[in-house]
Image (cartoon, coloured by chain):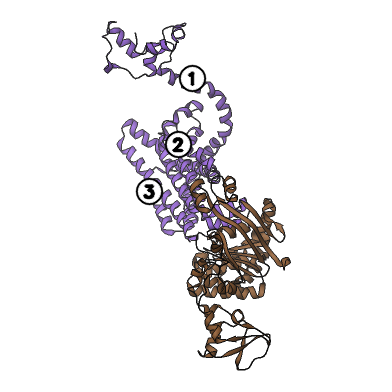
Chain colours: A purple, B brown
């Protein structure tokens, strides 16, 4: 006799409970109960179990057990997996291609072309000789301790993923800023993406794609890092001075003219802050993504953990910090230039 | 007379709230602002506004903050949609316009100047001034000259490549005015355009506006909370209170015949001698008279006559317009006019009670 027998008796579900009841797999509690012998003491109010799935299953064998929930979820996912990958595979294929191309490019170009090229980009974006010197020193140091290849792999992945985050994130942010409904729907999703432990969304991805494909970690990084650029684009456009928007309306701008000529340019400082955050988060994720075969400095960190090679792990970790500082300074310098151009 | 009316507002109502149309029924049934807010949670922003604005004149809408004047001006180019009523511009009902027609109205017929300038901070002064033409799809090399011309006209030579934040408030508003003029619209809406400026610059800008007006004869709708400014600029003055027109008419007339204690409060603080003109207080007569101390013009201020008479109250002056006598002004009448009169009995308050 189980505690909740009366519930099913009252509801007249006894027949349904017993119908074709083949004893399902026993739960651990059942086993323990059995091993202790059948003569259980009279139930007291202190032992009243919560009417959980397992407790209800005791009373009614046809009621599903809790483990069937996780199992059902898994089966459900597996059953739609083929259909899903049929649809997802082609549309994510360009991600694989661009990641492969970027990795190939960053590794094949000789260092004496690659490093000056990166420094040139820094100079164009930040317009600061001091910063260029700092970047040169950092990359030079990484190359000197033979971490150049790893660092370039990491950079290649970040460039591709951050660029895609901006390409997808800015339009989503714009859509959010234009409609409160879209914002209401999107914010919970963004909250979830931001708080879900990064390891958790690696799991379905592993089922969907082969671990050898670059898009597996590409998607993981993008999902994790896209949130700030969406949020800050939305915020930036919503914060544009209402009177300026009114002026744009008063002079008869179309909504496209208003978007490209007023809203996006005025939201640019916020959007740039979002891009900075997105790059930082891609860098954080690129380490975790090395669990699913992402190349780069993360692999060394992982090796350090797996083999307890303290030195390897620490040096690679410091290398990541150095890259983070470089990327942060360069994007912040670009942000400062945008801010200086349009302070009020 | 009616053919030179440019903008005509008829029975305009604006109700703010969740369901304005339902609340509008109560307003039509005679509910007042306070009751509507208390019983239905809707705010009556504008109530039964009827104003005619004549072409080529400056119509000033004056009221304290919360009186609905900024709401009213935004109905003219439909930045705010009315709950009921008509807005007729150039003989056409603006409220019947579709999006395309409305955009054309805003691009070609109306320009606007804002209290906080509302310039685009990421564009240069020249680009800001050229905005209205650029919006219409005019190429840059074509609008540059036009924008340049108006920037020079408002006194901003050589500032083309500055950014707005590099200019002072007064100069930024000059850019705002240049921008409005570049659009070449014949209606100019000015929403508290000079309120954010300090007094000396404000006077400068008022003079600039009057000077431009003399030359361009735009139909200007000017919003202000400052009575001195209103009296200086207005050809037609509309006084708004709690979303209702309390009095409208020629400024001199309102000053001499206020019909509401509210207006009386307003006008009790101003320097009447500087605002009132000879024509408003003179005795209308073409007959020559003896003991004339001198000639004054009909549009002279009383202040200038007082200066002329050196405080002697026994004198009389002949009032001329275009060299012909139109009346006689005795300094005694002049001094009497300097004392504010009580609100006349036809005031809306008198009618209400």
Work out whether residue B167 can be spotted: no
Give the camera-side residue of B44 and B234: B44
Q: Which residue occupies 38% across, 36% down?
A: A300
x and y percent of residue B224 in the render? 54, 66
Instruction: Give the mark, 1 or 3, whose residue is nearer the N terminus.
Output: 1
Number of residues whose C-alpha sits closer than 10 Å to that of mark 3, classed few (under 14), some (14–19) or many (20 or more):
some
Number of residues whose C-alpha sits closer than 10 Å to that of mark 1, classed few (under 14), some (14–19) or many (20 or more):
few
Q: Quadrant of the N terminus of chain B?
A: bottom right
Q: Quadrant of residue A45?
A: top left
Q: Is residue A179 left or right of residue A28?
A: right
Q: Which residue occupies 68% across, 55% down?
A: B94
Q: Chain of mark 3?
A: A
Work out whether residue A15 can be spotted: yes
x and y percent of residue B191 in the render? 56, 63
Q: Chain of mark 1?
A: A
Q: Is residue A215 above or below residue B51?
A: above
Q: Chain of mark 2?
A: A
- Which of the numbered marks, if any, corresponds to residue A75? 1
x and y percent of residue B307 in the render? 52, 88
């Amino acid at each position: 006799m189980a505690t909740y027998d009366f519930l099913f008796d009252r509801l007249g579900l006894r027949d349904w409970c017993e119908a074709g009841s083949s004893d399902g797999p026993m739960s651990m509690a059942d086993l323990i109960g059995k091993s202790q012998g059948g003569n259980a003491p009279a139930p007291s109010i202190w032992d009243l179990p919560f009417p959980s799935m397992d407790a209800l299953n005791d009373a009614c064998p046809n009621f599903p057990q809790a483990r069937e929930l996780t199992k059902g979820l898994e089966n459900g996912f597996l059953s739609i997996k083929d259909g899903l990958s049929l649809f997802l595979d082609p549309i994510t294929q360009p991600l694989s291609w661009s990641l492969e191309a970027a990795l190939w490019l960053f590794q094949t170009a000789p260092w004496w072309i690659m490093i000056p090229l990166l420094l040139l980009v820094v100079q164009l974006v930040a317009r600061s000789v001091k910063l260029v010197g700092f970047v040169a020193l950092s990359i030079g140091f990484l190359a000197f301790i033979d971490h150049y290849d790893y660092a370039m792999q990491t950079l290649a992945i970040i460039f591709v993923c951050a660029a895609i985050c901006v390409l997808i994130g800015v339009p989503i942010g714009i859509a959010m800023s234009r409609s409160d409904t879209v914002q209401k729907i999107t914010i919970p999703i963004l909250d979830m993406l931001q708080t879900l432990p990064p390891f958790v969304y690696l799991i379905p991805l592993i089922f969907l794609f082969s671990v050898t494909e670059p898009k597996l970690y590409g998607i993981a990084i993008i999902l994790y890092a896209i949130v700030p650029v969406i949020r800050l684009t939305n915020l930036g456009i919503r914060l544009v001075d209402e009177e300026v928007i009114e002026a744009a309306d008063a002079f008869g701008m179309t909504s496209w003219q208003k978007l490209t000529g007023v809203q996006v340019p005025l939201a640019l400082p916020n959007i740039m802050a979002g891009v900075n955050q997105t790059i930082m988060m891609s860098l954080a994720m690129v380490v975790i993504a090395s669990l699913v075969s992402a190349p780069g400095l993360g692999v060394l960190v992982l090796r350090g953990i797996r083999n307890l090679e303290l030195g390897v792990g620490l040096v690679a970790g410091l290398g990541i910090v150095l890259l983070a500082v470089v990327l942060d300074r360069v994007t912040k310098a670009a942000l400062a230039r945008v801010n200086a151009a349009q302070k009020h | 007379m009616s053919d030179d009316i440019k903008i005509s507002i008829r029975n305009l109502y604006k109700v703010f709230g969740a369901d304005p149309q339902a609340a509008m029924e109560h307003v039509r049934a005679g509910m007042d602002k306070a009751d509507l807010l208390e019983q239905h949670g809707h705010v009556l922003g504008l109530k039964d506004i009827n104003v005619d604005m004549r072409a080529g004149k400056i119509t000033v809408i004056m009221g304290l903050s919360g009186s609905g004047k900024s709401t009213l001006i935004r109905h003219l180019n439909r930045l705010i949609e009315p709950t009921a009523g008509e807005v007729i511009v150039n003989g056409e009902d603006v409220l019947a316009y579709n999006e395309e027609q409305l955009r054309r109205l805003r691009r070609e017929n109306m320009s606007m100047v804002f209290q906080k300038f509302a310039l685009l901070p990421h564009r240069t002064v020249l680009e800001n001034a050229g905005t209205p033409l650029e919006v219409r799809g005019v190429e840059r090399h074509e609008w540059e000259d036009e924008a340049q011309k108006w920037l020079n006209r408002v006194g901003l030579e050589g500032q083309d490549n500055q950014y707005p934040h590099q200019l002072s408030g007064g100069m930024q508003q000059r850019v705002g005015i240049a921008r409005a003029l570049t659009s070449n619209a014949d209606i100019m809406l000015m929403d508290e355009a000079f309120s954010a400026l300090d007094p000396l610059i404000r006077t400068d800008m008022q003079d600039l506006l009057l000077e431009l007006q003399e030359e361009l004869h735009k139909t200007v709708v000017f919003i202000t909370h400052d009575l001195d400014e209103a009296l200086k600029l207005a050809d037609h003055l509309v006084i708004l209170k709690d979303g209702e027109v309390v009095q409208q008419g020629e400024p001199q007339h309102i000053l001499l015949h206020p019909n509401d204690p509210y207006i009386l409060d307003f006008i009790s603080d101003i320097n009447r001698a500087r605002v009132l003109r000879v024509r408003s207080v003179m005795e209308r007569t073409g007959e020559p008279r003896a003991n004339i101390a001198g000639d004054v013009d009909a549009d002279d201020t009383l202040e200038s006559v007082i200066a002329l008479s050196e405080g002697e109250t026994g004198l009389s002056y002949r009032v001329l317009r275009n060299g012909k006598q139109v009346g006689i002004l005795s300094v005694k009448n002049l001094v009497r006019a300097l004392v504010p009169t009580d609100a006349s009995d036809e005031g809306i308050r008198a009618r209400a009670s």
